[in-house]
């Protein structure tokens, strides 16, 4: 079947080839939330591996990879238009350009992988480490953007637990090798059979967590549900703050910790004396983690702050992995030297980055690793020098991401971080989805998207430290580089 597809693809006109490649990429993206269709996702990758031998040159392979990648990223990252629609009159015109530039820009990495692999070999197996390497580059280059990695399609199945051993990039390698094996089944039937088993395990759902799996320590997640276009409107700010206070004081039983979302406090930390007193009164002596802006001179920080039972400031964490062009403009400080002001973090234009990931003490729940919004996207940021955290904690404002795919994809990435580290995750999101996640990535309890309220849930027990939690990405980087080195060496030997 794969050989027939290869021959058929070779007979098509250039226009039909490009349309099919774009469609293959879009189908491969169906593994991403909210669709989470792992079988179609595999089929999209199998199809592109099947047609790979029909590419007659590196130039043709570059074009094929670019169109396939554009289809994949356009389908999976279409939520990127949502931030530009918050203020439609001012920024709406930019929305289509954002989607085109982002999907095409990321597709260039896949196109380069296709071209280099075709330069090495006409055999489709050369594409596996190249494409996995391209995803590694995407995760680190220019501060990284590893959103919608292919391996996230595996989070709901048994196979997704492999991330605790080899991480998301290792699972990318496994997924791509499986798709390649299925495309090459006539030549390597035993390997293809292993691929079939892996696909079945990818689609086989995990058992649901048992309610008694918690430790008895209760965390309360507050979800005020402030739409982004109203969040900083003076006419609505008090309404959303009162919602959060109401959720904080609700219930007869007191939790052990209360968590508010990112920037959910409508004042800065240096002007928050009365605000903190109101939060402490509502919390009735329970410590609260709040998301709030703070200032140090002209510098602004996106912070998570621990308040004790009296509302006094305890630990403070400043977000360190900022969103380029969203929270700061690259080279803004440099540009200010040439008289171009307003973009420099040190002069108050945008956020400044904190010193890096670290643990904060939240009382009886122990030490948590705080992640503010975008930081949960990066598996490489989960490791901290020193003691292992007891809990991962994400506070986020997903109102920027719309109501369809963005918030659910962000939740999937939080679930993958829990699997990788073998740790529970608590996630407080302004508009949702707020959730408590166990160390296997299963959602123990959650609040629906775009609803106001709070969630009390028992914190699941952490697991033993995972292999990936100890090694990070280095083993997979070494495997990819070694494989590519071997392929280049074989290519050189053949050319001699």
Image (spheres, rainbow, N blue to C red):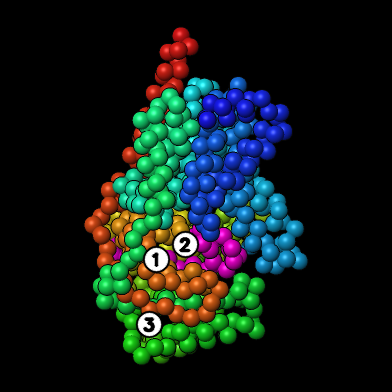
Instruction: Tell me if I can see residue 105 in this picture.
Output: no
Residue 460 versus residue 238: which sits nearer the camera? 460
From which residue to which does the magenta span run? Answer: 389-410
Distance in Å between CA atoms under marks 1 and 3: 32 Å
The residue lying at 64 percent from left, 76 percent from top is 230
Disc 2 element:
helix
Q: Which-is-in-front pick, marks 2 and 1?
A: 1
Determine if the magenta segment contains residue 391: yes
Disc 1 element:
strand
Q: Is residue 47 left or right of residue 288?
A: right
Q: Residues within 10 Å of mark 2 (few under 14, many from 20)?
A: many
Whichever of callouts 2 and 3 sits on the residue coming sooner in the sequence is: 3
Q: Residues within 10 Å of mark 3 (few under 14, many from 20)?
A: some
The answer to whether residue 184 is above or below residue 85 is: above
The residue lying at 45 percent from left, 68 percent from top is 395
Marks 1 and 2: in contact by CB < 8 Å? yes
Whichever of callouts 1 and 3 sits on the residue coming sooner in the sequence is: 3
Whichever of callouts 2 and 1 sits on the residue coming sooner in the sequence is: 2
Q: Is residue 182 left or right of residue 462?
A: right
Q: Is residue 240 left or right of residue 164?
A: right
The answer to whether residue 141 is above or below residue 313 is: above
Q: Could you say which disc has been placed on residue 411 in the image?
A: 2
Residue 312 versus residue 448: which sits nearer the camera? 448
Q: Could you say which disc has been placed on residue 312 in the image?
A: 3
Residue identified by numbered label 1: 443
Point out the residue furthest to the top here: 496
Distance in Å between CA atoms under marks 2 and 1: 10 Å
């Amino acid at each position: 079947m794969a050989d027939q597809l290869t021959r058929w693809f070779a007979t098509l006109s250039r226009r039909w080839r490009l349309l099919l490649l774009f469609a293959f990429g879009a189908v491969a993206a169906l593994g991403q939330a909210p669709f989470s269709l792992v079988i179609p996702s595999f089929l999209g990758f199998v199809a592109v591996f099947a047609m790979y031998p029909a590419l007659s040159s590196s130039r043709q392979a570059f074009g094929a990879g670019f169109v396939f990648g554009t289809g994949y990223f356009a389908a999976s990252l279409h939520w990127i238009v949502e931030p530009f629609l918050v203020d439609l009159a001012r920024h709406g015109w930019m929305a289509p350009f954002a989607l085109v530039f982002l999907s095409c820009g990321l597709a260039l990495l896949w196109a380069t992988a296709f071209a280099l692999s075709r330069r090495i070999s006409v055999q489709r197996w050369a594409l596996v480490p190249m494409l996995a390497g391209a995803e590694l580059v995407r995760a680190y280059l220019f501060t990284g953007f590893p959103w919608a990695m292919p391996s996230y399609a595996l989070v709901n199945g048994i196979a997704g637990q492999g991330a605790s051993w080899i991480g998301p990039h290792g699972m990318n390698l496994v997924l791509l090798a499986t798709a390649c094996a299925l495309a090459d089944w006539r030549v390597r039937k035993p390997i293809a059979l292993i691929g079939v088993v892996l696909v079945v395990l990818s689609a086989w759902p995990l058992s649901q967590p048992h309610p008694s799996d918690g430790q008895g320590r209760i965390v309360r997640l507050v979800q005020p549900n402030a739409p982004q276009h109203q969040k900083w409107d003076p006419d609505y700010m008090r309404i959303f703050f009162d919602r959060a206070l109401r959720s904080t004081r609700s219930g007869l039983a007191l939790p052990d910790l209360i968590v508010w979302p990112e920037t959910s406090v409508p004042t800065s930390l240096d002007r928050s004396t009365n605000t903190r007193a109101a939060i402490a009164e509502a919390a009735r002596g329970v410590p609260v983690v709040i998301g709030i802006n703070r200032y140090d001179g002209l510098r602004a920080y996106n912070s998570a702050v621990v308040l004790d039972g009296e509302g006094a400031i305890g630990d403070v964490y400043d977000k360190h992995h900022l969103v380029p062009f969203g929270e700061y403009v690259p080279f803004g400080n440099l540009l200010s030297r040439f008289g171009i002001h307003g973009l420099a973090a040190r002069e108050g234009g945008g956020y400044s980055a904190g010193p890096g990931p670290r643990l904060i003490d939240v009382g009886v729940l122990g030490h948590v690793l705080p992640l503010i919004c975008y930081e949960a996207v990066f598996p490489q940021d989960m490791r901290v020098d020193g003691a292992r955290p007891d809990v991962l904690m994400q506070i986020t404002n997903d109102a920027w991401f719309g109501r369809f795919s963005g918030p659910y994809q962000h939740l999937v990435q939080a679930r993958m971080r829990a699997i990788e580290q073998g740790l529970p995750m608590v996630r407080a999101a302004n508009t949702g989805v707020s959730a408590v996640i166990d160390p296997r990535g299963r959602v123990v309890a959650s609040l629906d998207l775009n609803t106001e309220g709070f969630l009390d849930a028992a914190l699941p027990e952490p697991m033993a430290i995972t292999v990936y939690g100890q090694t990070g990405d280095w083993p997979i980087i070494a495997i990819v580089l070694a494989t590519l080195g071997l392929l280049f060496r074989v290519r050189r030997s053949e050319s001699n």
